[in-house]
Amino acid sequence: MGLDFSIVPKYMDIILLGCAWTIGITVAAALLSFVGGIVFAVIALFSPWIIRQPFRLLEWVFMGTPLLLQLFLIYFGLVQIGIDLPAFVAGIIGLGLHFAVYNSELIQTAILAVDKGQMEAARTLGLSRGEALRKVVIPQAVRDVIPPIGNNMIALLKDSALVSVIGVSELTLSAQRVIGKTYRPFEFYILAAAFYYVINLGMEWVQRRIERRISISR
Amino acid sequence: MTEQTDFVEIRHAQKSFGTLEVLKDINLTVRRGQIVGIIGSSGSGKSTLLRAINDLDPLTGGEIWLDGVQVNKKLPHRQYEKHINAMRQQVGMVFQHFNLFPHMTARENVTMAPMLLKKISREEADALAREQLDKVGMLNRIDYYPSQLSGGQKQRVAIARALAMKPKLMLFDEATSALDPELVEEVNMVMKQLAEEHMTMIIVTHEMDFAASVCDRVLFMDKGVVVEEGPPEVLFRNPAKERTREFLRKHLEGAK
Amino acid sequence: MDLELMLKVYPFFLQAAWVTILLSVLTALLGLICGTLGAAARLSRFAVLRFLGAAYVSVFRGTPALIQLFILYFGGPQVGIQLDAFQAGVIGLGINAGAYMTETIRGAIIAIDKGQREAARTLGLSRWQATYKVILPQAARLMVRPLGVNLNMLIKATALVAAISVVELTYTAQRYIGSTYKPFEMFLLAGLLYMIIIYVTGRGVAWLDRRVQIT
């Protein structure tokens, strides 16, 4: 069986819809991972020992096991405890939490790198510890971690393909569905890869622009 | 062609980086056993000229001859690589930042190139390492790694490494500039000793006293040209050109 | 928590863990080969090779590993490449890991001070002699830790071959979740084994990193 790309246009609408889902899931999971990353970082650094230690263990589990396995746990686990969410929601939660842990690592390092004098200066103005963190320390740390977090978000795009395995009709599963009808795996997986590549290039372009803007603002 | 006595000959050397011309029509001859110093402010082109002799920064125009052979002759890439490697084996170079190989001991730094390129045995190489390190007063540190040595000690090992290839010519590129003041003398001593052995040397330096005491001839370079050259007692005491006077005045004030 | 069930199925997980380990080892070896070639291409004197190296890195890092695996395993037969799932897994993941390792290896090489190559060249060493006597021994020491990160990611990425039905840890967990409806227990079993593999590998890398440092 040779290659025949002429049937591609006929199924383009399905693939494009898949693309839209991939972008939507990536953006939603990215937002979740960003907010989650900040929350996790604050817990890991500033919460009492009794919360911090179990939390560290949880982080360790997230970083030491494959994302695919975590997706299975979240998807089937939620059903198990009686929460029946649509697959795409489970996918966003799974991707978002997974990358929140990685973002948290970056943010923790960045918070620790913010000069101690900044916290002291804020406290002498009368801000509480929480206020000083929120208003002074974290904004600076976030600025420092935007470039490496950008790399995580680009990784997230590619890992979003994994949610096809729990039945989310994003780009990869859309390609699979079309292949089920046409028996043309090579053509449609290459097509899907091309779309991922283009989205990836787009994200890299945005990342470069943001980095340039940050480098100006210091 | 070249006369027997002209050991190094640089003719119409020209070097540009893009539109920036850093060497403009430089001519220089060095006789066998002669010691030539090059002084000048940073950006004068003195280091570039020195590095061109070893083809680290190839010239964009002009010729360099060493002992009757043209260093920068036009050859197809493969042949040129062979040729330049052979030329470089005859020229020792000492860098400002030593560039010792950090993953090798002093002994290994000295023996690596002779063993690899001259195919000498381990025993011969070992004797060579002892001889050369002894000469620079570093025999007692033969099995130390560079990270365990002071700057002056590193530079002395780097000199031993270059000497182990039995070069016909030694090039020194600000060999003491990166050293703490109290470590300069030990390196200068080694260079003086080489001078007494009539090693041909070209020394780029900013130490006027040292240049005056060691060199047979000193060149003052500025903005890519040789402004003035002559014996040190003339160039330092009684320079002919205003630019030289100005440089020396500034430099001597700076030293105080 | 259903401990009885966990004890009953854990031998199957143990068996699957060996498949994961074998996959990881083979993938890492292939990745190192591809990464070395890729880095050599990216640092080559020839523009064509530099372009090919850059394209390799860009394409394989710019698309999901899962899709690459699918193209090779499902699309391969269309272009005359017949592989079983395990072979496709090793080759697909190995080439993918190689793209990441290319950047690691290249990064370590270009981090070595320019003066090192110059010093070697002034002694008369050729380009290649300077590279393997002076540059690579130093770069190799710099590479250990970042290659360890690549290895850590690669081990977790072997889970992807579950999607082409290679019976490794994640596939085994998925199958038992489906048949027992005990996701937490199955996750715990598989997750623990992954963490042991990752922990031991991490310690190995740290040990190697200490050993190769210059005193």
Image: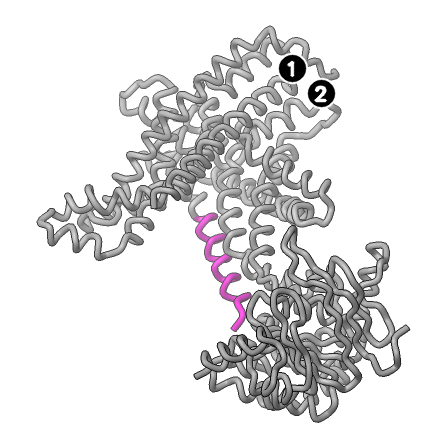
Does residue C16 appear left or right of residue C30 in this picture? left
Q: In which quarter of the image is residue B171?
A: bottom right
Residue positioned most to the top: A10
Callout 2 and callout 1 share a chain: no
Q: Tell me the chain of label 1.
A: A
Residue C65 x, y percent position in the rendering = 55, 32
Q: Is residue A114 above or below residue C20?
A: below
Q: Is residue B147 above or below residue C160?
A: below
Residue ID for mark 1 = A184
Give the number of the disc on residue C78: 2
Q: In this view, does C174 lie above or below A150?
A: above
Three-letter amino acid code at the position of disc 1: Arg
Residue positioned most to the right: B1
Mark 1 secondary-structure assignment: loop
Q: Distance between the residues labelled 2 and 1?
A: 8 Å
Dot 2 surroundings within 10 Å: few (below 14), some, or many (20 or more)? some
Three-letter amino acid code at the position of disc 2: Gln
Does residue B91 appear left or right of residue C70 in this picture? right
Asked if residue B116 lies in the magenta stretch, the reply is no
Asked if residue C213 lies in the magenta stretch, the reply is yes
Report the magenta stretch's main SS: helix
Are dots 2 and 1 in contact, CB under 8 Å? yes
Seen at 65% across and 55% down, the residue is B17
